[in-house]
Image (cartoon, rainbow, N blue to C red):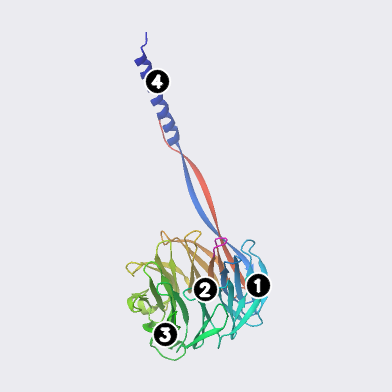
Amino acid sequence: MTDRNTISRYHFCFIVVLVISIITLTLAFLNTEKVWAQFTVIPIKVGEHPQNVEYNPINGNMYVSNFYTGDISVIDSNTNKVIHTIQVNGSPNVLEYNPSNGNMYAGNLDQILVIDSNTNKVIHAIDAGDSPQFLKYNPSNGNIYIGNLGEVLTVDSNTNKVIHTLHIPHGPTFLEYNPSNGNMYVVSDPNSDTDTDVNGKVLVIDNATNKLTHTIGVGKSPSFVEYNPSNGNMYVSNSGSGDISVIDSNTNKVIHTIQVGNGSNASPDALKYNPSNGNMYGTFDSDSDGNGSIFVIDNSTNKVIRTIDGGENMQNLAYSASNGNMYGTSISNSDGSGKVFVIDSDTDKVLQIVDVGDNPVDIKYNPSNGNTYVVNENSDNVSLITTTTTTTTTKTKTNSTS
């Protein structure tokens, strides 16, 4: 007669054998999943010689300025088709959205045009001096700043009238807002209009008085300024001296000078902050061979921690919040054809190189659809870069015994 303890032992042994068999069969066929990101390029036809692209959060569309045809194309973010062509009868270039009144501002010859976001019609024309090239919104006072040849104009967003004019020697060649202190930073470069070889300056405009409060000496031929929210400082690329000046936002003094590439043989240009890892990214070209690279500056040490091989004439950078990657444009020396390097923010490795149009001059991210837009000046189009994620499952048979 079999007692209950013996039956229980039989049951226990059966369960153990069953579990081992399941594990063995599971290990015999391993399922491996891989996720692949494929970047696809779709061309969007716009006007002739497009210059700039800007996102409008009021209607969720992208605006493209077309220099030769004298108009602005409005691209619907859902269909990625041009739904409006705004005639401006001139040569539009720079674009800037104004959150204070919800309108789009466009540089055009000696004026700044105000475009209503609801009707896509020009509602104001602001006299802006000689050849306005730069527009920047200041959230601290709600005004728009215009950089023309020799001046910085402050425009009241309520009245769209110029309320202040500052004379800037040798510039401005760039404008950037600093969220840490609410002021506007202006680049002044003597090498831009005179035959000299001297260091440039960055001027600080107080947001309350619109007067100059600081003059900061930087490197030679400063060309770009970018704010770093990780440490609250401003970064200035000096193409003539091959370095980056780091300006402390509290003291407005240079606290670091970072050499990139091979020093004077490198010409740093664009800068872009990466929210995914908190570092600063920049592009530079080598004066010796013309090959371009992308460098990564650690925000805590202000040292270059990586240099990523790029294409010829590395130009602009953009960050994609939808996939956390960095995008960098490149222009061929031989035929002007463009490429975009997609860089993984975790590994700083190039994920893919995609072909775009000729002479890509601008690149922007679209928060409405998560795509990236590249303006191709000599192809008269905009390259739409989309991301397709594919998951593949591989079943692998392994050696097992049961």
Task: Give neighbour class at mark 2: few <14, some 14-19, many 20+ (Cα, 10 Å).
Answer: some
Most common secondary structure along the magenta stretch: loop
The residue range painted magenta reads: 366-370
Among the two numbered marks 1 and 2 on one chain, the one whose residue lies closer to the N terminus? 1
Residue at mark 1 to residue at mark 3: CA–CA distance: 36 Å
Residue at mark 1 to residue at mark 4: CA–CA distance: 78 Å
Relative to 128, residue 275 above or below: above
Residue at mark 4 to residue at mark 2: CA–CA distance: 74 Å
Mark 2 sits on what residue?
Answer: 332
Among the two numbered marks 3 and 4 on one chain, the one whose residue lies closer to the N terminus? 4
Relative to 27, residue 380 above or below: below
Relative to 35, residue 156 above or below: below
Mark 3 sits on what residue?
Answer: 212
Mark 4 sits on what residue?
Answer: 11
Question: Helix, strand, or loop for circle 2?
Answer: loop
Q: Nearer the viewer, mark 1 or mark 4?
A: 1
Mark 1 sits on what residue?
Answer: 120
